[in-house]
Amino acid sequence: MSLSTQQVREIAALVDFDLDIFPAIAAESPTLLQKLELVQYWYEDESEQPEKEFPPTVQIERNVGLEGTGGSRFIKLQLNGVFFEVLTPNTTPIILKFRTSLPKGYMAIALNYRRRKQLLGEDLLNALRNAKERSLIGIVKLNDHYQIVKFFGTSAGNYDMGNQDIIDKLREWEKRCDFAIIGGGGDTLELAFKTLPEDLLAFAEEVDEFCPDLMGQGYIGPPLEEGATMEDFSRAMDEQNLEDLADYLDRNKEVHFWWD
């Protein structure tokens, strides 16, 4: 897709982006380019001071009511940017390239099928199907990748892990390996590893403890043969182990956490 100079100027003005951001986007041959509005709600709490957590590009509104919440009050966070679609299901190399090439204060993030459903108005089935062929990437104004986790309020209530618990664990891992937080949501998180700890099996055990649903409700073992049945898949899920998880991390250099 080729945008005219005027179209680029209009989109840049909408989100207060520098014009020199857009040639890098155009180089990825996007099929669309639109304004991105990410909105997240936190429970209103006097101890929360999001103004100190985020740059001024995150718009903050307090004492917001949401229908169906029984009168609870929330903090509304809104982060504007742009998003575009690329014809690949694997956005990690593109995002990592943007992370090194974009000016300071700009950050590329992955937008999963749930966000695709919201942004493009697709139903869930089509969003899942389309995400296997093409992907959405967003560019927003954040200063560091931990602000992604903070903005979305990523937590794992079923495992007694709040947002700060998750951030603390990631910071602990970052002392032993190099990774980029490339996406997230209220109960999801995506990491792309540049390096992994030397003792990969021990790290796999930590990863499993951090997100038991990786193997409890997902499959990370070796690819199944073509024509494998549901029974084969179910058996493989039951048999997968920490060695499989270590091999998965080594092969893919990324992990998509989801806490059910």
Image (tube, rainbow, N blue to C red):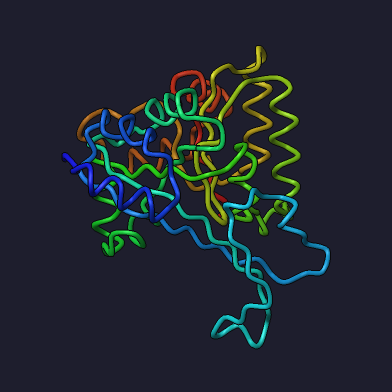
Residue at 75% x, 48% y is: 164
In the rendered structure, the answer to whether residue 92 lies left or right of residue 254 reads left
In this rendering, does residue 89 appear at all?
Answer: yes
Q: Is residue 64 above or below residue 153?
A: below
> Looking at the image, which residue sits at the far top?
198
Residue at 55% x, 31% y is: 104
Q: To which quarter of the image does residue 22 belong?
A: top left
Residue 234 in the image, given as x and y percentages of width and height: 39, 43
In the rendered structure, the answer to whether residue 29 lies left or right of residue 51 reads left
In this rendering, does residue 216 appear at all?
Answer: no
Residue 252 in the image, given as x and y percentages of width and height: 44, 24
Considering the image in quadrants, where does the N terminus appear?
Answer: top left
Residue 128 in the image, given as x and y percentages of width and height: 30, 52
Residue at 46% x, 41% y is: 109
Q: To which quarter of the image does residue 125 belong?
A: bottom left
Considering the image in quadrants, where does the C terminus appear?
Answer: bottom right
Q: To which quarter of the image does residue 8 belong?
A: top left
Q: Is residue 229 above or below residue 53?
A: above
Number of numbered discs on residues: 0
The front one of 259 and 224 is 259
In the rendered structure, the answer to whether residue 183 lies left or right of residue 129 reads right
Residue at 34% x, 32% y is: 90
Residue 146 in the image, given as x and y percentages of width and height: 64, 40
